[in-house]
Amino acid sequence: MEYSALHEHLDGGLRPKTIIEIAESKNIPIPTKDEEELRNWFFENISTEKKQVFKKFEMTISVMQDAHSIEKIAYEAVEDLVSDRVLYGELRYAPLQHLQENLSPQEVVNAVSRGVKAGENAFGGEFNTILCAMRQNKDSFEVAELAINNTDNKVIGFDLAGPEYKFPPSLHKEACDLIANSEVGLTIHAGEAADLSYIEDAVFNCNAQRIGHGWQIIDGCELKDNLYLPISDIAEHILNKQIPLEICISSNVKSGASSITIDDHPAVKLLNSGFKVTLNSDNRLMANTNLSTEFKKAEEHLDLTINQKEQLLTNSFEARFTNLI
Ligand SMILES: [Zn+2]
């Protein structure tokens, strides 16, 4: 069995050991130099402030500011994913967050690509990257152009990430339109920390081909006999067009972005209802998970059956940007 990892943040999956090594060599302050303590620090409640996801990214991003460190982190991500039986992955990151030591955006992309390619050569599998624009910033068009200019340099997709609430996708419509008319795939975080209208905006106004998280599509459905039946245009559209939902169970539970719990996560019910659900780890470090753990949790907490697991694996395979674009 092989996994496809479609929603995987490069800056959310670092090894604690690597963070400590880089931080020590550059005198970057970290909360502890003990690996396990550091792992726990990341896993602790990420934010108590609702609708603000992942303040701990500031820590990981602080050690990803020079080409050598970025390349090493990308290489290790491939190694860790392959050891979890992920043979296809799309690693996402926001290149403009890695310029504090004067790398150019292109140099950041080059460093990640070198690490990814070296990882493929050493461990096998196929890995591509998705460039994220931060939705609270006004530079998404620049990131979109960077993505389009790097399609022969491992970039396969574009994403809007960062705080969702109050930053709807259509603030970045110009960038999304540029991507929609290119050979770069478009996925948008929506329906994780904000409501259904953000999913609607991502799909109807920005033409997202996949939705990051998106589980709040349930607000556009009614639950009948344990199935989610669309009662809104957006839910009907996502179901009929089989727009993939990049669901991340552990991360949704841990992020503090919503009040969802592991036992009432709608992932499997959405799958049963015919939605194109895919399972992903989002941030292996912050959510203390990987893809095998996500499937295991779905089996233990959401009664995922073998057939449903097969369906999830097929969905992820079909939703790879290499197959969608
Ligand atoms: Zn994400």
Image (cartoon, rainbow, N blue to C red):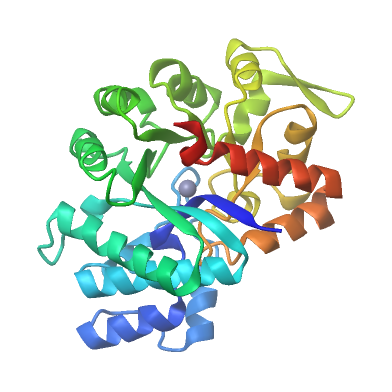
Task: Return the residue nearer the eye: 66 or 37.
Answer: 66
Q: Residue furthest left?
A: 102
Estimate the x, y position of residue 224 in percent, counting from the top left.
85, 21
Left or right: residue 165 versus residue 297 is left
Left or right: residue 154 versus residue 16 is left
Left or right: residue 233 versus residue 293 is left
Left or right: residue 67 versus residue 35 is left
| Residue in view at x 12 percent, y 56 percent | 104
Task: Count how many numbered circles sit on residues in the image.
Answer: 0
Estimate the x, y position of residue 241 in percent, counting from the top left.
60, 19
Q: Is residue 31 visible?
A: no
Picture quadrant of residue 69: bottom left
Picture quadrant of residue 265: top right
| Residue in view at x 62 percent, y 24 percent | 242
| Residue in view at x 71 percent, y 40 percent | 267
Estimate the x, y position of residue 56 in percent, counting from the top left.
40, 63
Q: Is residue 55 visible?
A: yes
**Residue 308 position (above or below residue 238):** below
Estimate the x, y position of residue 281 in percent, counting from the top left.
58, 55
Q: Quadrant of the N terminus?
A: bottom right
**Residue 59 position (above or below residue 316):** below
Q: Residue furthest right?
A: 225
Q: Quadrant of the C terminus?
A: top left
Task: Return the residue nearer the eye: 241 or 59.
Answer: 241
**Residue 240 position (above or below residue 252):** above
| Residue in view at x 46 percent, y 89 percent | 34
